[in-house]
Amino acid sequence: MRQTWIGTSWKMTKTLAESSSFARGLAARAHQDGWAGVQPFVIPPSTSLRLVADVLDGSGVLVGAQNAHWEDEGAWTGEVSVPLVVDAGARLVEIGHSERRTHFGETDETVRLKVSAALRHGCIPLLCVGEPEEVFARGGSTAFVLAQVEAAMRGLGPDEQRRVIVAYEPVWAIGEHGRAARPEDVSGVFEQLAAEFGSRVRALLYGGSVDAGNAARTLEVPHVHGLFVGRAAWTLPGFLKILDIAVSHGATCGST
Ligand code: 13P
């Protein structure tokens, strides 16, 4: 049985004090509970990456970065590279989130370069893909998402592909203006993602308005190996609740 991945990106939230408090609480619970069958991960803003990685060291919770440049170093003002985030404690790098594609000009090509950079430095690429509302409305979700994954993994060998985690996050489901997907909205995409990439990548996750009310039913969608959560996991109790749901889910059924 695969493990269930449950993670949260804090996006552009949390001061050092807030990050510390969350991470300390999570570390305490990790030592107490362990979350059998579940791999938790936390993706803080770059300002608190080092702090959170230090606090969670040895807890079993993976820590990641929200973005990293494809070059290792150089004159790229305002950017951080994969070696820099690894040095700060990241073991995973989020790449291609729709907010970065929409607001910061991320393209399939920059996403591909960043996936390669993450792999080059031993990081897990957390590749985010998802279709906009108009594509969903005309029934084009599956083709759109498969093309994004294909583009991001172009040129990778089988061993490299096996380290990639894909997070399917429909753009229309993300954030405070998003609406939670129903299982039937996304099951077709997961069916095809699994058929094309399921045995090639490490895991397929779902993200977009996940909360404690819909986490269990989302984990029941075939081929969903975990959840990538924003707002509902920005408080420690919120994240712990979803972790507990994933543990219960894993205890009752294996993910495919
Ligand atoms: P929300 O859960 O806040 O919709 O955000 C999801 C997300 O963007 C995770 O990457």
Image (tube, rainbow, N blue to C red):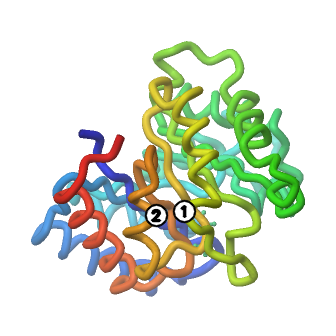
Q: Which residue is drawn at 19% across and 67% down?
A: 30
On residue 22, which mark appears?
Answer: none
Can you say whether 50 is above or below 11 in the image?
A: above
| Some atom of ligand 1 lies within 8 Å of the CB belonging to the residue at label 2 | no
| Front residue of this view, candidates 120 and 171 | 171
Q: Is residue 220 left or right of residue 168?
A: left
In terms of sequence position, does the residue under pointer 1 or pointer 2 come before the other?
Answer: 1
Q: Which residue is drawn at 62% across and 68% down?
A: 181
| Front residue of this view, candidates 244 and 194 | 194
Q: Are marks 1 and 2 in contact (CB under 8 Å)?
A: yes
Mark 2: few/some/many CA within 10 Å (<14, 14-19, 20+): many
> Pointer 1: what residue?
183
Q: Which amino acid does label 2 sit on?
A: Thr
Q: Is residue 2 left or right of residue 102?
A: left
Can you say whether 138 is above or below 116 in the image?
A: below
Q: Which percent across, then down, holds residue 141?
A: 76, 48
Q: Residue at x 78, y 53 (%)?
A: 131
User: Residue reaching furthest left?
Assistant: 32
Q: Which percent across, then down, holds residue 200?
A: 49, 24
Q: Which percent across, then down, holds residue 113?
A: 73, 31
Q: Which residue is drawn at 58% across and 68% down?
A: 182
Q: In which quarter of the image is the N terminus?
A: top left
Q: Quadrant of the C terminus?
A: top left
**Residue 28 sits in quarter:** bottom left
> Pointer 2: what residue?
218
